Amino acid sequence: MGKWFLVALIATVLMAQAQWVLLPEPDFSTRAICWTIPQAKNTVLWPVRIVNSELVGLDLDTTRDETLTRQGIVEEARTEASKLLSKATISYERDGRNIIKYAVITSEDPRTSACVFAPDFRKKFHETIGPDPVVLIPNRFTVYVFPRSMAPLTELSEQAFIDYRSSAFPVSREIFQVTKDGIVAIGKVK
């Protein structure tokens, strides 16, 4: 009994240390539990943690934990999203007059796309992109950020589509408005 108790205790500690994130995913992915995104037709949220270097999603067994609530997952995910945003690389695409057209967030972390849920996301891009950032999330590792007043440029739409099609982990071709509470789908690139 001692050995199995120790294994169970270690597993419980590791699971408690793993932080939840809300990972945007294509709706065709087969996940046990996914949450909807307002107005989205092709994208859902997959609540996940990294356990033993692998993404582990919310499942029916986990939901039986009485201490686990949707609100608790969302709060934890928003905190973790801020950490992901702070670790990611942000680059800016400029036009001929050196004016920023859009930003690109990239990272090797497979949870990078969850950074759009960071409470400080809008503030981070307020000075460079404007007060109402809009995002394209072509894959888990890339997020394009641009002003709401500007429809995705042809150049950006084409690159996002290439990023979507060429990825082993595509996310979406939908366009999302970033709000203080999360994201809302507002359109789609072709």
Image: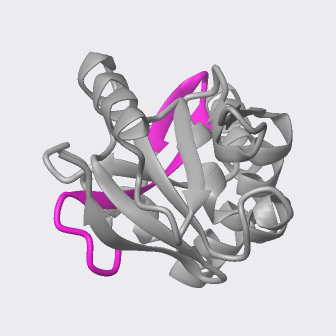
User: In terms of secondary structure, what is the magenta stretch mainly?
Assistant: strand
Query: For the point 53% across and 70% down, which residue is it?
Result: 148
Above-or-below relation of 165 to 29: above
The percent position of residue 176, horizontal first and vertical second, equals 43, 65
Relative side of 132 to 56, left or right: right
The percent position of residue 47, horizontal first and vertical second, equals 47, 57
Query: For the point 26% across and 70% down, which residue is it?
Result: 40
Query: For the point 60% across and 73% down, which residue is it?
Result: 74
The percent position of residue 39, horizontal first and vertical second, equals 27, 79
Q: Quadrant of residue 129?
A: bottom right
> Split into 4 quadrants, where in the image is the N terminus?
top right
Query: For the point 17% across and 44% down, which residue is it?
Result: 30
Q: Quadrant of residue 75?
A: bottom right
Above-or-below relation of 135 to 64: above
* Closer to the camera in the image, 52 or 137: 137
Above-or-below relation of 58 to 157: below
> Split into 4 quadrants, where in the image is the C terminus?
top left
* Closer to the camera in the image, 64 or 31: 31
Asked if residue 51 lies in the magenta stretch, the reply is yes
| Residue 20 visible in this rendered orientation of the protein | no
Q: Quadrant of residue 118?
A: bottom right
| Residue 101 visible in this rendered orientation of the protein | yes
The percent position of residue 89, horizontal first and vertical second, equals 77, 29
Question: Hey, which residue is sitting farthest front in the picture?
Answer: 97
Which segment did they paint magenta? 36-56
Above-or-below relation of 167 to 28: above
* Closer to the camera in the image, 1 or 124: 124
Relative side of 137 to 99, left or right: left
Relative side of 171 to 129, left or right: left
